[in-house]
Image (cartoon, grey):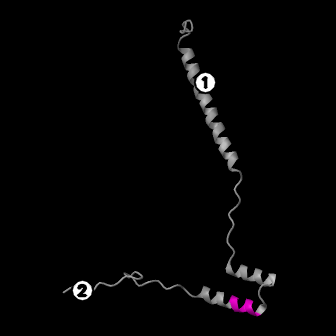
Amino acid sequence: MWDMHNAGWGWWVLSSVGMVAVWSLVIYGVVLLFRSAGGERPPAIEPESPQDILKRRLAAGEIDVDEYELLRDALADDASRQPREPALGSTPGARQASPSP
């Protein structure tokens, strides 16, 4: 009754290919579902530079021209200074070992 009247190996191959096709479609559908659920991501927004913030505050009337020029010069001074690097072999806050006798 279950031998399909001696249909042979052809049915075995056909059912195997069909099963692979069905599972491929299921996986493809799940992938499409997750992609569409995520939606479009907004582009990355770059943070405003301090100079741009200063210009915006001047344009909005939050600061006057004198304060703008003072802060602009302070920002230019900070940008021209290079941060000091620690000396080779030293770490901040570390105590130097004294030689033992």
Vertical order, 67 against 32 (above or below): below
Above or below, 83 relative to 25:
below
Residue 95: x and y in percent read 35, 84
Extent of the magenta region: 66-72
Q: What SS does tag 2 mark? A: loop
Front-lying residue, 80 or 26: 26
Q: Amino acid at mark 1?
A: Gly
Q: Quadrant of the C terminus?
A: bottom left
Identify the residue at image location x=68%, y=63%.
44
On residue 99, which mark appears? 2
Q: Nearer the viewer, mark 2 or mark 1?
A: 2
| Viewer-proximal residue among 99 and 24 | 99
Main SS type for the magenta part? Answer: helix
* Mark 1 surroundings: few (<14), some (14-19) or many (≥20) residues within 10 A: few
The residue located at (54%, 17%) in the rendering is 12
Q: Name the mark on residue 91.
A: none
C-alpha span from label 2 to label 1 = 79 Å
Residue 73 left/right relative to 63: left
Residue 41 painted magenta: no
The residue located at (58%, 28%) in the rendering is 20
Q: 20 left or right of 95?
A: right
Whichever of callouts 2 and 1 sits on the residue coming sooner in the sequence is: 1
Residue 70 in the magenta stretch? The answer is yes
17 with respect to 35 (left or right):
left
Taking the spot 69% from the left edge, 89% from the top edge, the residue there is 71
Residue 8 in picture, x, y percent from top left: 53, 11
Front-most of residues 37 and 47: 37
In terms of secondary structure, where does tag 1 sit? helix
Q: Amino acid at mark 2?
A: Pro
Instruction: Name the quadrant containing residue 94.
Output: bottom left
Q: Residue furthest left?
A: 101
Q: Position of residue 81 (x, y in %)?
A: 57, 88
